[in-house]
């Protein structure tokens, strides 16, 4: 088996934000800099994801999961380390974020499809399948601003699902639309894996991760707390959550 995603010694920190009224008013240069450290959002992250497998990322809020997905997608660069993505990458981070509200559903498939890197021919060839999968036939020529959030998510998922990609990055969008549509999306993702597609999934839905993923990592305050088989990662994460409810300070130690 070969790796589709390779993350070697990756570190990331964001630009320092002004903290407190003094720094906002007098400016950064005059404020006492020693009080403000730039904290690492991610520290020394190492993992590989095999082609045709699904990798789950879990952790408390603010532990660096979305930052890691943004690095994999290439929208932000690492400060240290290397990321290698072998194949075409698409993200399901915010479904429908690339849509224009004044355009119709059909027009938005062309707009979003081209943002995702599809050629005009690829979009035309897949148009009926995208509309069919979304089950929005009756509303496809209405403006997106008239759609419910569930309808927008369905059209977003369907457009990405018909984009030829090798690696899909998913952030908390396993629950798209109603239960019938969710089942369809779950089946699509299983089929994607079976076709040697690679999934990287961030979710707080332990059940969905256990069902979908093969391996994963649990992040804690920007570093890897545990990595390996998904069952091991999820059971360690549950233990950490139980401990943090009892003794919050213990898991914050380096
Ligand atoms: N644009 C930004 N500028 C500065 N700091 C940021 C930025 N985005 C995230 N951070 C910080 O980086 C750390 C990791 O944030 P991130 O959003 O990756 O966490 P997360 O695990 O995805 O959280 P959640 O589960 O709440 O979505 C946090 O301390 C957060 O405050």
Image (cartoon, grey):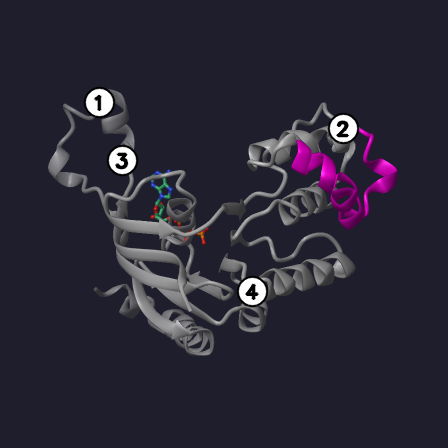
- Disc on the earlier residue, 3 or 1: 3
**In x, y percent, where is residue 69?**
43, 50
Name of the residue lying farthest toward the right: 138
Mark 2 lies on residue: 104
- Residue 25's place in the image compared with 211, above or below, is above
- Disc on the earlier residue, 4 or 3: 3
Which residue is found at the position 85% from the left and 41% from the top?
137
Name the foreground residue: 20 vs 219.
Answer: 219
Q: In terms of image quadrants, where is residue 187? A: bottom right
Which secondary structure class fits the magenta region best? helix
Which residue is found at the position 43% from the left and 44% from the top?
73
The residue segment tinted magenta is 121-142
**In x, y percent, where is residue 79?**
24, 43
Label 4: how many residues lie within 10 Å, few (<14), some (14-19) or many (20+)?
A: few
Mark 4 lies on residue: 205
Which residue is found at the position 42% from the left and 70% from the top?
241
Kindly report which numbered mark, 2 or 3, lies closer to the viewer in this rendering: 2
For the residue with label 3, is its CB less than 8 Å from the closest atom of ligand 1?
A: yes
* Secondary-structure class at tag 4: loop
Kindly report which numbered mark, 1 or 2, lies closer to the viewer in this rendering: 2
For the residue with label 2, is its CB less than 8 Å from the closest atom of ligand 1?
A: no
In the picture, measured across the screen, residue 5 lies left or right of residue 95, that is: left
Mark 3 lies on residue: 15
User: In 3D space, how far apart are the residues under numbered discs 3 and 1 (Cα atoms)?
Assistant: 15 Å
Label 2: how many residues lie within 10 Å, few (<14), some (14-19) or many (20+)?
A: some
**In x, y percent, where is residue 252?**
27, 63
User: In 3D space, how far apart are the residues under numbered discs 4 and 3 (Cα atoms)?
Assistant: 31 Å
- Disc on the earlier residue, 1 or 2: 1
Q: Is residue 253 magenta?
A: no
């Amino acid at each position: 088996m070969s790796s589709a995603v390779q993350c070697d010694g990756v570190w990331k920190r964001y630009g320092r934000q002004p903290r407190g009224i003094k720094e906002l008013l007098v400016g950064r240069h005059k404020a006492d800099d020693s009080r403000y450290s730039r904290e690492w959002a991610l520290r020394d992250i190492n993992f590989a994801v095999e082609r045709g497998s699904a990798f789950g990322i879990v952790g408390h809020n603010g532990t660096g999961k979305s930052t890691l997905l943004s690095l994999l997608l290439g929208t932000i660069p690492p400060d240290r380390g290397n990321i290698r993505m072998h194949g075409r990458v698409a993200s399901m981070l915010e479904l429908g974020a690339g849509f224009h509200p004044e355009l119709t559903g059909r027009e938005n498939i062309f707009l979003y499809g081209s943002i995702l890197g599809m050629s005009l021919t690829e979009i035309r060839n897949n148009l009926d399948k995208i509309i069919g999968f979304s089950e929005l036939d009756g509303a496809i020529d209405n403006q997106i601003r008239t759609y419910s959030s569930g309808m927008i998510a369905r059209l977003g998922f369907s457009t990405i699902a018909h984009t030829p990609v090798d690696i899909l990055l998913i952030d908390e969008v396993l629950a798209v639309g109603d239960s019938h549509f969710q089942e369809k999306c779950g089946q699509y993702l299983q089929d994607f894996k079976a076709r040697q597609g690679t999934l990287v999934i961030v979710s707080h839905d332990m059940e969905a991760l256990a069902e979908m993923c093969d391996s994963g990592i649990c992040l804690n305050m920007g570093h890897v707390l545990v990595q390996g088989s998904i069952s091991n990662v999820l059971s360690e994460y549950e233990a950490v959550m139980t401990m943090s409810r009892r003794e919050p300070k213990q898991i914050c130690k380096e």
